[in-house]
Image: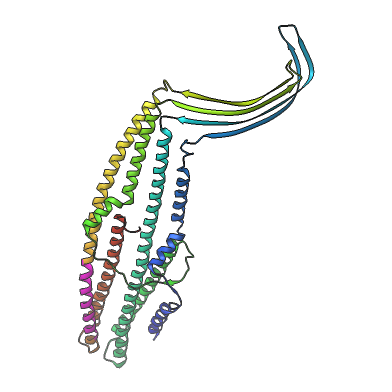
Amino acid sequence: MKCFSITGLILFMFATGVESQELLTLQKAVAIGLANNYGIIMAQKSQEIAHNNASPGNAGMLPEIGLNAGYMNGLSDANVKVVTGAELDNSSAHSDLITAGVGLNWMVFDGLKMFITYDKLKKLEEISELSAKITIENTVARIIGSYYDIIRQGQVQQIFSEQVMISKFRLDLAKMRFETGTGSEMEYLKARVELNADVSDLSNQQTLFENSKTTLNDLLSRDVNTPYTVRDTILVNGQLQYDSLRLSMNSSNRNLLLAIRNKQVGQLELKTARASQWPTLDFYANYNYYRSETEANFVQYNRNFGPSVGVALNMKLFDGLNLTRQYKNAAISVQTGDLEIKQIENRLEAYLARIYNDYRNQLQMIGFEQENLLLAKRNMEIAKESYAIGSISSLQLREVQQNLLDASTRLVTAEFKAKLTETELMLLSGKLIQ
């Protein structure tokens, strides 16, 4: 009776508290993750910064306007002689100086570099957006994997619960036979030991199940102790086609698009290096006010104010060949960008082929293991009946029980792996999020 009490207590513990818990669907989990995940929020903040940076002013396309003003009051020992023979000698000469002005400076031509820079800032904004989407995709993939891992752990827990019930059936018969003298004490004790082992496995599996729920809560950036339940079935899409996935991957994979944008930035760097060889033309306009009163000079009062405009042309004739070096380096970066794109395309092709092969294999394994599980269950029914009438030994019953356990866990594992490969294929093809 002691073993029965332990088993009943554990099964009761697993069953309590479930009805009152929230049902967390995968769609809701993804929505919570998109709203709360710290990595996603930080990526979105970086995207906002890149958006703010992609402005005409940051590219140097707009003028700069400045205002300045100043006041100075001084006391000096002045001694001034001029060629005419006049002399000024004042040991406590006061002076006041007031200046003010507003000025505009605008580079109206820089070899079109400002326009190239603006295009570059726009590309960098696109890169930041792609990086944020990559973060979102990876996070969603992890949420999906974590969600279905909870279902897997729950299904395995149910399998272990069924194993406990079978072992309890065996123990009841072994005990009855021992007490009536038709069975041995050794068989009875062996049944108790193996029931305790199954209860231990069930308890360990419960811990794995609870830990998997904690992992998902962490991914959703919410209280890790938030209670909830999940669906109990792993639904696998068995209709994914290789050619369709490959076509979508080549046009929509975020990592490939990111490499293409990086190459485009390199091409703009090349244009920038070329544009730097041109002269620059600046336009400026100012309005200044100046007033000076001093006892330390023959000119004791001076005031002037008014506008001024002008242009300035600047051109580097020789800069130590730095522009040439920058141009060559930019050209090499463009070539490197081409190589990086080809490398990513190659790796994606190979990875897609491997993952798709795994996906098809897991779908086949699901079919095999579904059939095996039906056979194992039927075999278990026959074995229990046979053991009840004494036509098979406890060892044979345990072997059939182990076969059922293996068939059940293999099916759950195949379904879980198929779901993971399905998610990875959707991630590769850029279809995981729109």
- Along the horizontal axis of the image, is 317 left or right of 386? right
Query: In the rendered image, which quarter is residue 144 located in?
Result: bottom left
Query: In the rendered image, which quarter is residue 268 located in?
Result: top left
Q: Position of residue 250 (x, y in %)?
A: 27, 50
Colour convention: rainbow
- As displayed, is residue 93 above or below residue 143? above
Q: Is residue 379 magenta?
A: yes
- As displayed, is residue 426 above or below residue 297? below
Report the magenta residues as a range: 364-384
In depth, the one of 83 and 77 nearer the eye is 83
Residue located 75% across and 14% down the image:
79
**Whether residue 75 can be seen here:** yes
Residue located 24% across and 54% down the image:
246
- Magenta portion: prevailing SS class: helix
In depth, the one of 110 and 165 nearer the eye is 110
Q: Quadrant of the C terminus?
A: bottom left
Residue located 32% across and 48% down the image:
257
**Whether residue 215 can be seen here:** no
Q: Quadrant of the N terminus?
A: bottom left
Q: Is residue 241 magenta?
A: no
In depth, the one of 235 and 418 nearer the eye is 235
Q: Position of residue 273 (x, y in %)?
A: 38, 31
Residue located 77% across and 13% down the image:
88
Q: Position of residue 66 (x, y in %)?
A: 58, 34
Outermost residue on the bottom side: it is: 180
Q: Position of residue 306 (x, y in %)?
A: 63, 26
